Image (spheres, grey):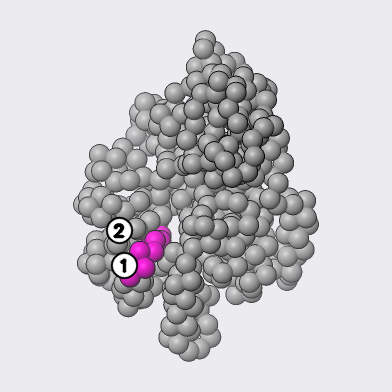
Amino acid sequence: MTGGSGDDSSGSTRYTSSHIIDDECKLHSGDFILHRDGSWTASNGDEDVQTTIDGSNRVITRSLQNWHTHLPMVLNRGMGEGLTLGDWLEKNIFPTETRVTTDFVKTGTLAGVAELISSGTTFACDMYHYPASIAPVLADAGIRGIVCGPTTAWPPPEHDAENEDTRVLNELENLIRGGTLAEGRVEYGIATHAVYTCSEEVLRRASEMSRKYEALLHIHTSETRAEVAQCHEKHGMYPIEYLDSLDYFTDRTVCAHCGWVTKREMRILASHGAHAVHCPVSNQKLATGGTLSYPAMIEAGVDVRLGTDGAASNNSLDMRAEAKAASLIQRHDHWDSTILPPKEAWKLATKDSNDWVAWNLNDIRMRPRGIKNRRLLANLLYSNSDCLDVIVDGNIIRQNGTTKTLDEQQIALKLEEAVAEYYDGIDPPQG
Ligand SMILES: [Zn+2]
């Protein structure tokens, strides 16, 4: 280990005898330096760096980016399995969410963030209640995030819903006004849950707030066929058309799911530069029947991202598994085995990442490597490998398979205690 703080070596890491897969998914072998600004260069071996790691059993890639999460819903993972969507919501999710507190949210977020880091993800675009209990957890753990808070009180209060909604919106505005956390690594955004849970007024006000503060606007759109049919019946328009008619879209809009959208709606998304987030595992688990059409979205010019959704409707926050699922369902749906090959699927899952992950090359699932290691990326994507190191902003937040910024064992115990209380007396049947 060489170098000192305050010079160019600060926050730089050298990997020796290693492999790196660059932004274009091209593989390079040798010694590398990962710089604090997120760039990388080949190493001559004599540069000052903060840390040197033997990379001979590692392959380095950009980190994974999760564009749709409800991190505290790790609390709901594995409950109500095998129920219908209606029973799952009414007997499992809603009864617990009436009990949600800032403490539960914090505990669930800690577990969620620990899982993100351990599976090589360094960014989450979240949507949940009590954002002020979520954002500091991401900041302290050393990852990046956009923490979108609610614009409506949910679960709906017994009375005075209108004032309660105003209070929630004002609270969110104060948080956004307060600025970013951790030198901009974590920011607050605005979550309008869906067109069927937000009034026209709430959607308009949230959109105005997004413009005023340049804050990200996050919404579920066209997740189920029933939602789309109801919207058309009520407004004579499909959800994305309806949102457009309200002038809802801003420069920073994230639409999760987009499973039941028309080509006209895709063109609307493209015209606003909106991000459409593909959530293939959640859609399949909840049997929504439709999932985002990747080729059609790309043809329309939409910026597609990838997300797991909450752990309740996925069971996992593992973005590598999500990239595999995306690749499989797109091929299956379109009868075309050439859609989302490994390089494209990996680029989709890591888009805009400025951070790094080192995966275990000694994992048997990474074999065979093939001539010139050309099978490495396909093996990583489809077969998986353990995540050894995670580097964000030059900081090594996980090394040799241990997260340094969080105590995983303590979080696990805390989660068990919290879930016992959260689900006390609620025991939906398991399928
Ligand atoms: Zn969601």
Identify the image quadrant of the N terminus.
Answer: top right
Q: Earlier in the sequence, mark 1 or mark 2?
A: 1
Q: Amino acid at mark 2?
A: Asp
Q: Which residue is mark 2?
A: 251
Is residue 203 in view from this perspective? Answer: no
Say few, some or many: other residues with alpha carbon within 10 Å of mark 1 (under 14 / 14 to 19 / 20 or more).
some
Q: Is residue 403 left or right of residue 73?
A: right
Q: Is residue 55 above or below residue 349?
A: above
Q: Residue at x 49, y 57 (%)?
A: 184
Residue 254 lies in quadrant: bottom left
Q: Is residue 151 left or right of residue 6?
A: left
Residue 164's tag is: none
Q: Amino acid at mark 1?
A: Arg
State yes or no: discs 1 and 2 in contact (Cβ < 8 Å).
yes
Q: Is residue 328 above or below residue 118?
A: above
Q: Is residue 383 magenta?
A: no
Q: Is residue 216 magenta?
A: yes
Q: Residue at x 70, y 46 (%)?
A: 404
> CA separation, marks 1 and 2?
8 Å
Relative depth, front residue between 4 and 144: 4
Q: Position of residue 384 (x, y in %)?
A: 60, 31
Relative depth, front residue between 69 and 54: 54
Is residue 293 in view from this perspective? Answer: yes
Q: Position of residue 355 (x, y in %)?
A: 52, 41
Q: Is residue 176 above or below residue 296?
A: below
Q: Residue at x 55, y 29 (%)?
A: 33
Image: magenta residue range: 212-221
Q: Which residue is mark 1?
A: 211
Q: Position of residue 234 (x, y in %)?
A: 28, 71
Q: Is residue 256 left or right of residue 415?
A: left
